[in-house]
Amino acid sequence: MELLEFSLKSIRPACDYINVVYSEESWYGKKSPVEIRPALDDLVRRGLVDEVLEYKVNVKRQPTDNESRKRNMGMKAALRAGCDYLMSMDADEFYMGKN
């Protein structure tokens, strides 16, 4: 979570729409030790994120299945927002634009 803002700043100039899909627990059911949603809502207020979606983990599923479903949730939201292209990334990934 600590790198998310910097990651978003690296792509915001090139994106018309950004969503963040998060979960309050790990694939194994361990709850997050900190509240995530207030920080995400702040990113929306500051214009770095357009939509925040919460994925509810199903611990009966394999972690890879949860991961796929979580990414598909973000893709479906991007399609609803009218996006023609999608770039899925994790919070600790960065992209460099043209200088």
Image (cartoon, rainbow, N blue to C red):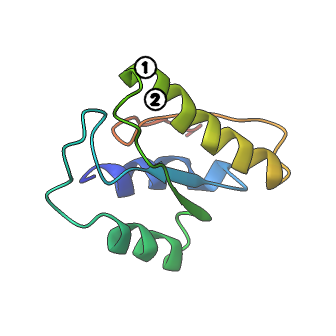
Residue at the farthest left position: 33
Where is residue 53 shown, x and y percent of the image? 54, 57
Front-most of 64 and 39?
64
Closest to the observer, 81 or 76: 76
Task: Say which amino acid is labelled 2.
Answer: Glu
Q: Please rate how many residues cluster around mark 2, counting C-alpha atoms within 10 Å: few if below 14, some from 14 to 19, many from 20.
A: some
Picture quadrant of residue 85: top right
Question: Which amino acid type is shown beneath numbered disc 1?
Answer: Thr
- Residue in the image at 34% along x and 75% along y: 38
The location of residue 27, given as percent across then percent down, is 31, 33
**Residue 30, located in which quarter of the rendered image?**
top left
Location of the C terminus (image quadrant): top right
* Residue 24 quadrant: bottom left
Q: Nearer the viewer, residue 59 or 91?
A: 59
**Can you identify the residue that label 1 sits on?**
64
The local secondary structure at tag 1 comes to helix
- Tag of residue 87: none
**Is residue 28 positioned above or below 24 on the image?**
above
Q: Relative to residue 63, is residue 2 depicted above or below? A: below
Report the side of 76 relative to 3 (left or right). Answer: right
| Above or below for 86 versus 61 | below
Query: In this figure, which residue is indicated by the disc labeled 2?
Result: 67
Q: Is residue 85 left or right of residue 26?
A: right
Point out residue 12 in the picture as x, y percentages from the top left corner.
57, 55
The percent position of residue 43, horizontal first and vertical second, equals 45, 69
Residue visible at 20% across and 51% down in the picture: 31
Determine contact: label 1, label 2, CB under 8 Å. Answer: yes
